Image: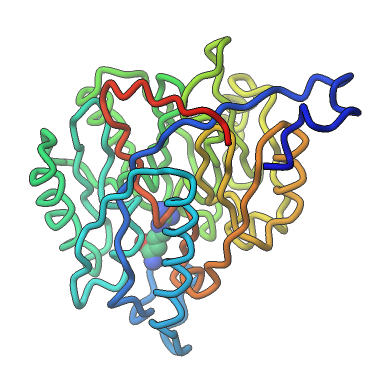
Amino acid sequence: MSTQATSNPAAATTTTPTRTATKRTILMCKPDFYTVSYRINPWMHPEDPTDTAKAVAQWQELHDVYQGLGFEIHLIDPIQGLPDMVYAANGGFVLDGVAYGAKFQYPERQPEGPAYMDWFRGAGLQVAEPVETNEGEGDFLLVGDVILAGTGFRSDSTSHEEIAKVYGRDVITLKLINPSFYHLDTAIAVLDPEPDADGRSNIAYLESAFDEPSLAILRERFPEAIIATEEDAAILGLNSYSDGYNVVIAARATTFAEQLRAKGYNPIGVDLSELLLGGGGVKCCTLDLHPVGTGNSAARS
Ligand code: ARG
């Protein structure tokens, strides 16, 4: 791809890092039954029409971009009457061969929890039944070897203790304060799914989405982070998915795309405008299965 920093002579004198794409294994759910029939976040307006065929076409484009990047894509069957099931990131959290199930806050989405658990079981994963309310990778993001965990709107902070016990990892609680950014993955993008040679993983985030103590944690832990603009965040631009080099983002998040390029990443824009009506974007449609022991590195194309 032509955006490699090293192909730009001017960049040779700067310190733009070289990025490495890793092979990703993900779970997605085709939006065959997508619509907006209830309102559980400020993006949703059930009184406005939605276009299921358009949602499917846009989702298919995302799927095909991932396929082109060489990702291993698993699919869960959509279920009629569960219009938000397309947002697979909320279906649970998977790491080390163990799926920690989601327990949704709103009754409209609660049947999704067991549906995803059945899929995890069928895929041969161990399952950890959730006791505490949590919305999977919507609020849990693996960065390096720690789990960043959101709370404030959906996942209860008690689930942060629960997930820490399930995986024996450090879990860092971050408090969200703006209802438009109600899941952690709407306010933070993980840019390096695996740590670089120095053991570092970077993120991008929206400062105004967090309370002060959480911001202090983010600033301290991620001094190199990309600080997203309000404009990009307002179209869920941060809700993106990276393989370490290629970062699939909302096509309209143009400043974010520039910020990514400046740091040596390759942004790839997709248009998920129809799924934005439900309050979701790229990452929401993508559950990272973090498979065990794949080594995972693939050469950059
Ligand atoms: N309508 C869904 C909800 O409010 C959107 C979920 C978006 N998913 C995400 N990972 N942020 O729950």
The quadrant of the rendering that contains the N terminus is top right
Q: Position of residue 191 (x, y in %)?
A: 56, 34
Q: Position of residue 65 (x, y in %)?
A: 49, 55
Dividing the picture into quadrants, the one containing residue 19 is top right
Q: Which residue is located at x 36 percent, y 20 percent?
A: 295
For residue 214, say whether it is visible.
Answer: no
- State the scheme by which the image is colored: rainbow
Q: Nearer the viewer, residue 217 or 258?
A: 258
Q: Which residue is located at x 71 percent, y 32 percent?
A: 264
Dividing the picture into quadrants, the one containing residue 34 is bottom left
Q: Position of residue 178 (x, y in %)?
A: 55, 54
Rendered position, 179 above or below 162: below
Tell whether 42 sits left or right of 89.
Answer: right
Rendered position, 247 above or below 295: below
Q: Position of residue 180 (x, y in %)?
A: 54, 60
The quadrant of the rendering that contains the C terminus is top right
Q: Which residue is located at x 84 percent, y 32 percent?
A: 8
The number of numbered badges drawn on the structure is: 0
Tell whether 15 sits left or right of 167.
Answer: right
Dividing the picture into quadrants, the one containing residue 210 is top right
Q: Which residue is located at x 24 percent, y 23 percent?
A: 167
For residue 298, say whether it is visible.
Answer: yes
